[in-house]
Amino acid sequence: SLSDANIIFLESPAGVGFSYSNITSDYKVNGDIRTARDSYTFLVSWLARFPEYKTRDFFIAGESYAGHYIPQLAQAILYNNQHANQTIINLRGIAMGNALIDLETMMKGTVDFYWTHALMPDEIYHGLTSSYNFASLNSSDKVCLEFIDQGDAAAGNIYSYDIYAPLCNSSSKFNTVSTFDPCSENYIETYLNNPRVQEALHANVTGLPYPWQSCSGEINRNWKDKPQTVLPIIQELMAEGIRIWVYSGDTDGALPVTCTRYAVKKLGTPVRTAWYPWYTQGEVGGYAVGYQNLTFVTVRGAGHFVPSYQPARALVLFSSFINGTLPPPA
């Protein structure tokens, strides 16, 4: 809704979407630190070009790996507000959806979600939970990671971003309660690689390292740095009074709602408003808990990309976040 906020959609780091760098080696050195630095530089430059927005309240929102990007960018903004001779950015809040926040709770939360949703057999679940300490898990623990891969394989060919959705090109793709077309990703990729569309968008495709794609394996393979957890940064932001929302579509199997719940529990912040169902259009839109300096919200029937699956519920969520109110209890 235009009455809620003006929105900037930022593609980062360089090489994502239609973003590019004039220095081709930049595509080989992307990482968390560089992404936060470049995103901050963009914001300062954007506000210099559009100074009428300098005094506005500023919020950051995103999903998935933005669980890293958002708190890191927020931290950079707060630091530079205090220590750099730069434009003051009036950061008021951040919102992260189905976010990668903490490796330990991501692994434990995903395993528990798969088992409790009948996607993993007992023997693999009990083998993982009895034999491995997720707190000390790292990429070199090949035996445990192979066990986890077996758990993924046991779930079969499902769309992990929405465990109840049909597959693209499935004969049953329209016999579903979801209004989200499972082939949307295919349509978008075809559309954004159409030269006429690229011309209309003024995309500089000559500077791109590869055609437009929804997820770049090249960038992932060349990623230089990422911490196992950003919970300390989130705690730092909480202490500074930044409004923090973490929300989860509850049918996402890629970064399930259990991951978010475990991460919030790890923060140990006290509850102010106990768990309750929130409503929109006469239906339960999800569930919410108000913590001290943090709000946790679920979105019922939404997969990994909450606004795509439940746009009406997502709008209520977004408006509540911007306005600093909990989602409506009735």
Image (cartoon, rainbow, N blue to C red):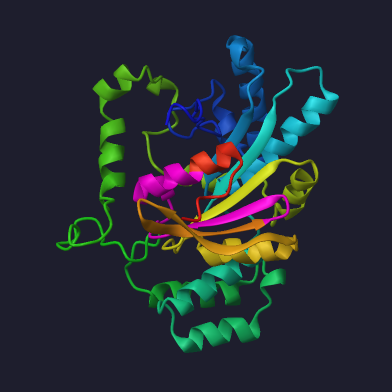
Residue 203, compared with residue 238, is above or below; it is above
Please provide percent x and percent y for residue 150.
Answer: 46, 77
- The magenta stretch spans residue 82: no
Magenta span: 291-317
Outermost residue on the left side: it is 171
For this orientation, the residue located farthest to the right is 83
Judge by depth and name the residue closer to the eye, 306 or 2.
2
Q: Identify the image quadrant of the N terminus.
A: top left
Tell whether 287 sits left or right of 186: right
Residue 237 placement, left or right of 161: right
Give the quadrant of residue 296: bottom right
Rendered residue at 40%/76% (across/down):
119
Residue 166 vs residue 130: left or right? Answer: left
Q: Residue at x 25, y 50 (%)?
A: 181
- Corner quadrant of residue 207: top left
Q: Which residue is rendered at x = 58% and y = 30% of the image?
A: 25
Q: Is residue 304 magenta?
A: yes
Labels in figure, total: 0
The answer to whether residue 31 is visible is no
- Name the one closer to the observer, 224 or 179: 179
Residue 251 location in percent, x, y? 41, 63
Compared with 152, 69 (above or below) is above
Q: Position of residue 315 (x, y in %)?
A: 43, 42
Horizontal side of residue 113 vs 236, given as left or right? left
In this view, the residue in front, 294 or 144, is 294
